[in-house]
Image (tube, grey):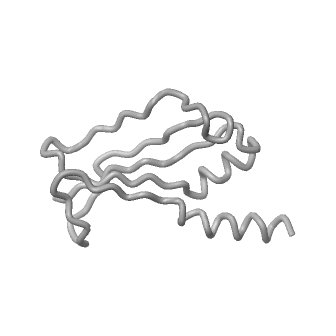
Amino acid sequence: MFFATVSIAALLSSCMMTKTSVGTFKETRGNEYTYSKGKQWWLFWGIVPIGRTNLSTPTDGSCQVITRYNFVDFLISGVTAGILTTETIRIVAKR
């Protein structure tokens, strides 16, 4: 039962994602690359942030910010019973 619950939660974690386009970024496929990435850490089930993650962005300001809760984030939250959680943040730009 435990294995089934963990498997289902891991498979559904990709639903927890936001994409925010900045500047003139178009969401069409082709020539995309990860400009920078990092993790935001939280305490007490996401209530209190531990610092603020500052990621660099392209000089023209045209990029997409993708915030997601992936499998590693799920494991960290599960092992600590939610007291410590993380989010993965990625900045995507076009060449």
Give the position of the C terminus as an image quadrant: bottom left
> Residue at left 49%, top 27%?
51
Residue 20 placement (x, y as % from top left): 33, 55
> Residue at left 22%, top 70%?
30
Residue 82 placement (x, y as % from top left): 71, 43
In this rendering, the count of numbered labels is: 0
> Residue at left 15%, top 41%?
59
Residue 37 placement (x, y as % from top left): 39, 45
**45 up-or-down from 49: above or below:** below
Q: Which residue lies furthest to the top in this view?
A: 51
Give the position of the N terminus as an image quadrant: bottom right
Q: Which residue lies furthest to the front in this view?
A: 47
Foreground residue among 76 and 45: 45
**42 up-or-down from 72: above or below:** above
- Determine whether, in the image, residue 36 is placed left or right of residue 93: right
- Determine whether, in the image, residue 15 is placed left or right of residue 58: right
> Residue at left 36%, top 33%?
54
In which quadrant of the rendered view does residue 21 lie? bottom left
Q: Residue furthest left?
A: 60
